[in-house]
Image (cartoon, helix red, strand yellow):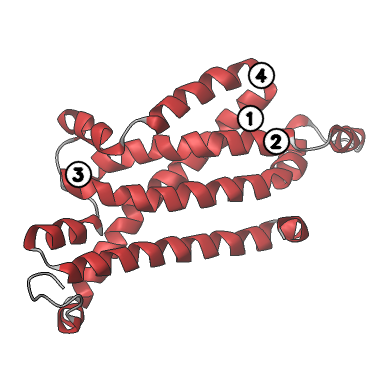
Amino acid sequence: MLDGEPLVRWHWLGDHLGYLFDLTSDHAVIALVPVLIGLLLAVPLGLVCARFPRLYQPLSAVFNVVYALPSLAVFVVLIPYTGLATRETVMVPLTFYALAVLLPTTVDGLRAVPEPVRQAATAMGYGPWRRLAAVELPSAIPYLIAGLRVAAVSSISLAAVGALVGRGGLGYLFVDGFQRTFPTPILAGIVLVALLALVTDLLLVAARLVLAPWAKGAAR
């Protein structure tokens, strides 16, 4: 309790269900679209790096440096270019953060395909593109899903910081609660961020079981 304020005002939650749903939806878009874009960029970049290993270390170093930058500082730097309180100000850095996670897992997944498997596919008449689609990418799926799980949960967490520059989904609840010394929205934001992360992670686990059932035993 803060100055007589109860920890949770249940009637406030009941009166703001629509508001909480809108913030959660906005948060999901801001956090997960960059992960999808990062995946779409990571796969072709991973293919290039797997074919030309000398490119991997420089690219990985660049993305690691970006990943190490404080998210709030990057948001502030982008404001003159993408505007204040816009989704782009938050989503652009989150895309690079996701790419920094997904590029190594993509490369690791492609490199994990045993050479005898590639040779067997070639002997069966598979060309490079068919071998990639039918053998190499499916074998890399467990690695890609593992990277997506890390990137998605991290993005959901980092997206809340965007509220400090005017667009952060559930992060508004933290800012509002602190400004008014009102803990109810803060706790609601914590619970909703955790639930969003948990649901996203479970969906990705389910996707791995469907797309790569052979990896189930290895994961255990």
Determine crowd level at label 2: few under 14, some 14-19, many 20+ residues with C-alpha closer than 10 A: many
Q: Secondary structure at mark 1?
A: helix
Amino acid type indicated by mark 4? Phe
- Residue drawn at (10%, 64%) of the image: 181
The answer to which of marks 2 and 3 sits earlier in the sequence is 3
Is there any visible trace of residue 15 in the rendered image? yes
C-alpha gap between disc 4 and disc 2: 12 Å
Q: Position of residue 68 (x, y in %)?
A: 40, 31
Marker disc for residue 110 = 2
Q: Are marks 3 and 4 in contact (CB under 8 Å)?
A: no
Q: CA distance from mark 2 to mark 1?
A: 8 Å
The kind of residue tagged 3 is Thr
**Do labels 2 and 3 touch, CB within 8 Å?**
no
Circle nearer the N terminus (1, 4): 1
Marks 1,4: beta carbons within 8 A: no
Q: Which residue is mark 3?
A: 86
What is the distance, in whole Å, between disc 3 and disc 1 at their CAs?
33 Å
Q: Position of residue 23 (x, y in %)?
A: 24, 63
Q: Position of residue 197 (x, y in %)?
A: 43, 60
**Badge 4 is on which residue?**
52
